Amino acid sequence: MRLVAAVLAVLGATAGGAALGAPAPAPAPPTGGELQALGAAPVKSALASERVYFVLTDRYANGKPSNDRGGLSGTRSVTGFDPTDMGWFHGGDFVGLRGSCGGETDGLGRLAALGFTAIWITPPFGQRTVQGSSAAYHGYWITDFTKPDPHLGTEAEFASLVECAHELGLKVILDVVVNHTGDVISLTGGSGGYIGPEQVPYRDCRGKTFVPARFVTRAFPCLAVRSMPRVPLLQGLDRTAKKPGWLNDPTRYHNRGDIDFSSCNEACTEQGDFFGLDDLFTERRDVVDGLATVYGSFIERYRLDGIRIDTARHVNAAFFRRWLPRVRAAARRAGVKDFLVYGEVFNADTLELLPFARDRGLPTLLDFPLQDQLVGFASGERGPRGIVSVLGDDDYFLRADGVSYTPPTFLGNHDMGRVALLLRQRSGTGAGLQQRVLLAHALLYLLRGAPVVYYGDEVGIVGSGGDKLARQDLFPTAVAEWRTEKRVGAEPIGTRSSFAVSGHPVATRLAELARLRKAHPALATGSTSVRLFSDTVLALSRFDRGARREYVAAFNAGTRRSTVTVPTATPGSAWSTLLGERQTARSAATGLLRLSLAPLEAVLVRADTELPRRAPVPPTLVVRPDDLTNLVQARASVKSPEPVSVGFAAKRARGGWRRLAVDDSPPYRGFLDPRRFRRGERVHVVAVARWPGGATTVSPSSVSCRAPGSGT
């Protein structure tokens, strides 16, 4: 916090506040076209309108039993196939996932009928079939980046899957791995024992030490196997096990041993082997180029619509700014508009995620912070304050280009376990589990973000843990434990297919929520205003600015009925019920709206009348050090219930006003990073509000501050 303290020493932190010390002459406020540009409304990312189904291909449907063993013969240690063991290939494939491509009871047609707009599939690439006591059914042990794994199908079958998806209006999001490959390399001294650069630095082929991060944009030092931190060993067929061939060069890996997650610093996180997998030397330009080529060619060949990036926290800090432009260029060549990109950083702390978006170049990240809070609230374990905090933290991720931060949101996954299990564990008793699952999905669909549903949740699978224990078959399973597992809203599956489960309450709720989100785009792209939160109730407004309509979504995680009075921006209006128990509601002249919420239920209502038109007023600006980061916070308030957006702009000694961020959900905030300015530089900041009718207002005077720091 020293940097922020230094900012405070020279910061005028009140509306129009003069800087301490000699004030700089205030620049003229922006006017005309410049003012309009600075006040432009935020742009919603293409991801905001998506509803994503995340599926492990091996566990969805077995459409072609002849590929179950991947063309191999012998025991499961060779073929990887054992449908009775949850850690091995079970037979699901591209043909099964595609299905008939017409009906609503199988394959992709079933997912389209449930209202999904995209599928996210686990990596389809060729695998290191068996490692240790498990097989690569999940897709994260890639050795052949050039074609699909034969257990899943052929190139033609994968192409047919993608073509069918596009015919049905579904986008295809490919799970990709850039941090590692399958475990082929052996290291001297065994598989463990991470050795950090502080112990054994990297040496080039001449024995000279070097720091890899200093060479990410220039010629990399020559390397020799003998000089790696731990000498890599390849024997027999392993010497040529990977494709393309450049992946078989052992100097293209960090070779430091396995990550010790109990005591891992940043170097360990980025250079250690993730559970023994061969960690790519992503500081090397040829590795970056090679990964861009293999994934770019797959995107072009099949016209894929987006990527989810596995283990994104484990590559070096400069990687994504070098790699992503190449991948996006491939998508443009394929004619893919609005290519979707999101990364996985497995951390529920917003501040830990922030550098990956602000500094490392990832456009958005899976929303682990919100997942933790949604499950905590829906389970009754905690109140909604944490949800409100996470929604407010979106401001940290806002960018100068005006694109709103829209993360993929989720409730459970293949690593942590399914939402029904998490809710049962955190509720203590498991009472009302079905209602809690339905409530959790209502939260997922009615709050901001792109909802991601984990396959099998729609038929009530609960599971008994994370990882292997959460990766059930939807086709008739041979795993004895899965046949007898309890389900939400359905009997144990036995020897039946989950596709035979019709009218399941979770599936019904998902289809209903999808219809609402499609019919009312404001639920996907509208701004949010939190209205109230208590121990068991959360209520918020979503706004359709074009139609000038307000929606109120309210959630009761308590086991008793709750009657709440919700502030709104729409006075004297009747409200129509779109979801939940029917409300006979009318907002008062003050805008207050009374709602009655059944236990463990969600309600969505929409105002029957338009928002009243109000006279624009200027925003009030306050600039101050941020309490949680080394950033400087610019905060604006607008004395009006009108749903405005506020742009924040800075002016240096030379040049015009430049936008820092734009925010359409109160509290309105933008952030300055002192590292982006020269030491001692004087900077002026203004706030520009844009009103639904297009009018703009600017804060009465700019706030002046001097940037401290090293000038980096």
Image (tube, rainbow, N blue to C red):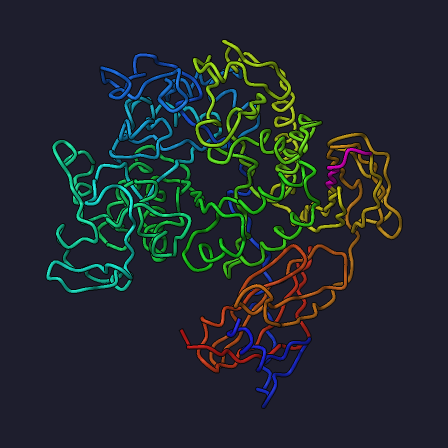
Whether residue 208 is situated above or below residue 265 in the rendered picture: below
Residue 300: x %, y % from top left: 31, 37
For the magenta stretch, what is the residue range? Answer: 553-560
Count the labels in the image: 0
Whether residue 136 is situated above or below residue 13 in the rendered picture: above
The stretch drawn in magenta includes residue 556: yes
What residue is drawn where x is 47% and y is 77%?
Answer: 655
Q: Nearer the viewer, residue 388 or 588?
A: 388
In this rendering, position of residue 162 left or right of residue 692: left
Q: Is residue 166 visible?
A: no
- The quarter holding residue 187 reads top left
What residue is drawn where x is 48% and y is 25%?
Answer: 168
Farthest residue to the top: give it. Answer: 495
Residue 311: x %, y % from top left: 39, 44
Farthest residue to the right: give it. Answer: 589
- The quarter holding residue 267 reads bottom left
Q: Is residue 266 visible?
A: yes
Residue 406: x %, y % from top left: 54, 47
Q: The C terminus is located in which quarter?
A: bottom left
Residue 434: x %, y % from top left: 67, 25
Whether residue 358 is situated above or below residue 172 in the rendered picture: below
Q: Nearer the viewer, residue 623 or 75?
A: 75
The stretch drawn in magenta includes residue 661: no
In this rendering, position of residue 151 left or right of residue 187: right
